Amino acid sequence: MTRTPLADVACSIARATDLFGDAWTALIMRDVLTGVTRFDDLAHDLGISRKVLAARLSRLVEEGVLVRERYQERPPREHYRATAKGEELYPVLLALMEWGDRWYAGPAGPPARIRHLGCGRDTTPVSACARCGEPLTVGNTAQLPGPGGRTGPGTRVLGPLLAAREETPETGHPTTV
């Protein structure tokens, strides 16, 4: 597996964007999760060079986000399918889409809609608390130190900031020591 400087940063955002922070990777995952799975179709849809596409797909396969599957023997042809790890990127893509729709949709409106198949209605993604269901915002959440946190490259300021926070036992709210 290819190691990069961000792979060793004690931050899940740094580690995830090390793989997923490239625009082509996000668009490849958008396409694969929407049903565009063949190399030639991906190259045509995205207008990406075959060399760049091959490199991004190889990395996604190497990281266990996609699998390459043969769909035709003669001539040999393969397509890409998202693994469970890859499917778990869907909410990330939905959040990016919602943000892009809010801030960058043209006058005609968003370029795509999301329909929830369970109720048959169009919807938007909501990031909510798993405990109470309340929407999560910058104003009503706080980052606290986690068991894998440490101070080092990429967290030289953030690491000590989080380490200084404690939860008040009565409220569960963080306080600065």
Image (cartoon, rainbow, N blue to C red):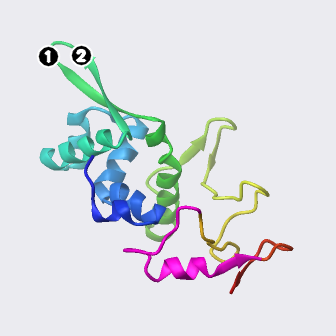
Residue 166 image position (x, y, % from top left):
70, 77
Q: Is residue 76 left or right of residue 10?
A: left
Q: Residue at x 67, y 72 (%)?
A: 141
Near-viewer residue (177 or 19): 177
Q: Which residue is mark 2?
A: 72
Instruction: Measure the alpha-carbon separation of dots 2 and 1.
Output: 7 Å
In the image, is residue 27 above or below residue 170?
A: above
Q: Which residue is mark 1?
A: 75
Q: Amino acid at mark 1?
A: Pro
Q: Residue at x 27, y 32 (%)?
A: 38
Near-viewer residue (154 or 126): 154
Residue 120 image position (x, y, % from top left):
65, 37
Q: Amino acid at mark 2?
A: Gln
Region rendered in magenta: 147-167
Q: Which residue in the rendered view is the most extreme toward the bottom?
A: 177
Q: Is residue 127 visible?
A: yes
Q: Quadrant of residue 86?
A: top left
Secondary element type, mark 2? strand
Please say if the residues under marks 2 and 1 sit with CB atoms less than 8 Å apart: yes
Residue 14 image position (x, y, % from top left):
41, 65
